[in-house]
Amino acid sequence: MSLFNRRTLLLMPFALAACGFEPVYAPGGSGAALNGQVAVSAPKSVDSYMLVQNLEQRLGRSATSGSEYNLDVNVSTAFRAAAITTTNETNRYTIEGSANYALRSNATGQVIASGTVNNFVGYSAAGSTVSTLADERDARERLMVILSDQIIAELYAAPGLGT
């Protein structure tokens, strides 16, 4: 005997609709409401440039004057030694990143969604100087992609968008 019941599978969409579930990319959803309508703040550092670039790729690039929303983003990073040998040489680093964001409506000036996202990445410092610098640059890029994905997920889940 199987515990799987096809009737519950058929009733699942009705249960999700009753609880207020709405697909993000459906017509009128928050994904459609933000696509091409968000002007992201100007970058202030290399890290914020990479973050803004990833946000614009996901949200669509918008002209500042024609956008419905403004997204202010501030990024900070910190380096930490993660693996130190007995001879006091660092073989691995972690980069901890934090991004504060606030999505404002241009029509009302009201903050629609705001918050902070945090994450970290690691990279090896055991190779040559050139490979260590390349690993660090790649780790910074990965961190900014992770942070931008987290911001996008939180914006899509924000109540009041797409209504």
Image (spheres, rainbow, N blue to C red):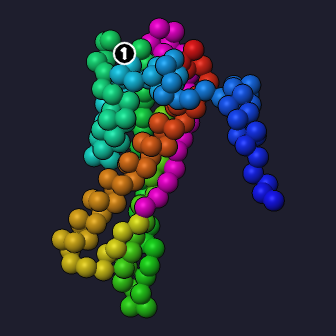
- Residue to which mark 1 is pinned: 67
Can residue 95 be seen in this snapshot? yes
Q: In this view, does 55 lie to the left or right of 14?
A: left
Disc tally is: 1
Which residue is at the far left?
A: 130
Instruction: Specify the quadrant of the image occupied by residue 45.
Output: top left
What residue appears at the point 60 percent right and 19 percent down from the top-left corner? 160
As rendered, which of 30 and 114 lies closer to the eye?
A: 30
- Where residue 80 sits, quadrant-wise, is bottom left
Is residue 99 in sight in this rendering? no
Measured as percent of width and height from the top left, residue 101 is found at 48, 34
Give the answer, above or below, for where 92 lies relative to 137.
below
Which residue appears farthest toward the front when viewing the image?
1
Question: What residue is at 73 percent from the left and 43 percent from the top?
Answer: 6
Q: How crowded is mark 1: few (under 14 residues within 10 Å), some or many (20 or more)?
A: some
128 or 8, which lies in front? 8
Q: Residue at x 43, y 27 (%)?
A: 71
Question: Magenta span has 113?
Answer: yes
State which region is magenta: 103-121
